[in-house]
Amino acid sequence: MSEALERNKMGYAKMFPLILKMSLPAMFSMTVMALYNVVDSIFVGNISKYGELGLNAVSYAFPLQMLVIAFAIGTATGANSLISRRLGAGNQIEADSAATHSLILAVFTWVVFIFIGLFAVKPFLNMYQCTGKVFEYGYQYLTIVLCCSLFIMVQSSIEKSLQATGDMIFPMLFQLTGAITNLILDPFFIYGIGPFPKLEVMGAAIATVLGQFAGMVFALITIFVKNNKVHVTFKGFKLNFETIKNIYAVGFPSIIMQSISSFMILGLNAMLDSMGVTVLGLYFKLQSFIFMPCFGLNQGLLPIMGFNYGAKNKKRLYSAIKCGIIIALVIMTIGFVIFQTIPDKLILMFNSENAELLRAGVPAFRLISICFFPAAVAIVFISMFQATGKGFRALLLSFTRQLVFILPIAFIISQIIGSQEWIWLAFPLAEIGALTLAILLFVNLTKTDFKKLDKE
């Protein structure tokens, strides 16, 4: 098979096997990515004497940490969409330019987070009136993670650029390298094993960024040494503001979409007591093992849908959407069963001595996990909107899911019922509303933009 034909496999290969081939490595790598926060929290939660305070601190820190991921992945997603569409249209030069711009934008974004890490962490923690060990742990963790965010920014940029070409193996290996490094270093830095100092929560942050550094180094070697289908080069390079505009046309809505989660958690934290904040933090870490495979599925779907949209092949575009929804529902069904049957065992991984955490967490996990089914379908639609350059629709859908619906519903429940236990019902109600909106937006698209496909 010629190189040109192999490059265009997204336009001719059987859809279901193609999605699995492209998505499974990404699904695995995204699941591995979920290990970062989960592993940190498991080790932190079992710190003698201060485990509960450490869990509380990283739960408060979680929204800002998610903000880093939102900017890293959001910007890279914009580049991914642009690269796949340019490759679908047969424009290699513009695809290479988009990949180079993505790497430069990653560095610019890191500079912003240095300032946030140096000047915004204390006001952020003071907003929640954190004191004592919780404040100390939270300040240490956030400052290190934010100021060293360059590593995850660069790694994400390269991952998405390669995924846009159909290469899912190396991005998976980048993630695996970082997660394994973090997993190995965590106990040494947290508990002070051997010659390592006992740094507790600070040690968790150091292990995390060192893992991200290892993944970044691997990614840089791959993009500059390996013969890839998209190339990053700075020889004769000039910033092209049209390319930047095209990247952020999808990237900025993606950033906002993923940042919304941070603001949603901030809002919910304000309604919850300290135990509720810890339960919410643990839920988001654990549900990442369910949602991350769906996001990995979307990473495989995005270039397929983007390529076939660029090639004006409506039949294959619709086939990708249908297969993606089926696979996402299977993943979420597995997650639902786990959260319904063994929520106690999930919680006990973090702190086996806190009975109150168990009493609060078990019913919360069971109630929230009802949202998995409508979320599965909505997430695939969001990816489809991104892949076809409809970033505003993707933004609107995510904004509705996580702010327009969930926070008002949670607030109303807290005011009417007056019990924290039922606030968790806001999750499934919000996802049902979002799914309804997603279907309406898709139907509208089939009657307008998609109607032109296969006719030009």
Image (cartoon, helix red, strand yellow):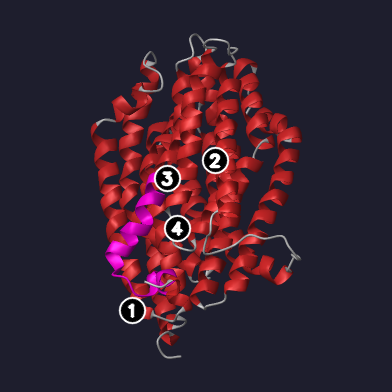
**Location of residue 129 in the rendering, given as x and y in whole percent from the top left corner:** 64, 25
Tell me which amino acid carries mark 1: Lys
Q: Which numbered disc, 3 or 4, marks the residue closer to the eye?
A: 4
Q: Earlier in the sequence, mark 2 or mark 4?
A: 4
Tell me which amino acid carries mark 2: Gly
- Residue 315 bears which disc, if any? 1
- Whole-angstrom CA distance, mark 3 to mark 1, is 29 Å
Tell me which amino acid carries mark 4: Asp
Quadrant in which residue 252 is drawn: bottom right
Q: Which numbered disc, 3 or 1, marks the residue closer to the eye?
A: 3
125 left or right of 28?
A: right
Q: Earlier in the sequence, mark 3 or mark 1?
A: 3
Q: Which residues are magenta?
A: 5-28
Observer-nearest residue: 352 or 433? 352
Residue pointed to by mark 3: 29
**Location of residue 282 in the rendering, given as x and y in whole percent from the top left corner:** 43, 31
- Residue 215 bears which disc, if any? 2
**Location of residue 292 in the rendering, given as x and y in whole percent from the top left corner:** 41, 46
Helix, strand or loop at disc 4? loop
Residue 224 visible from this viewpoint: yes
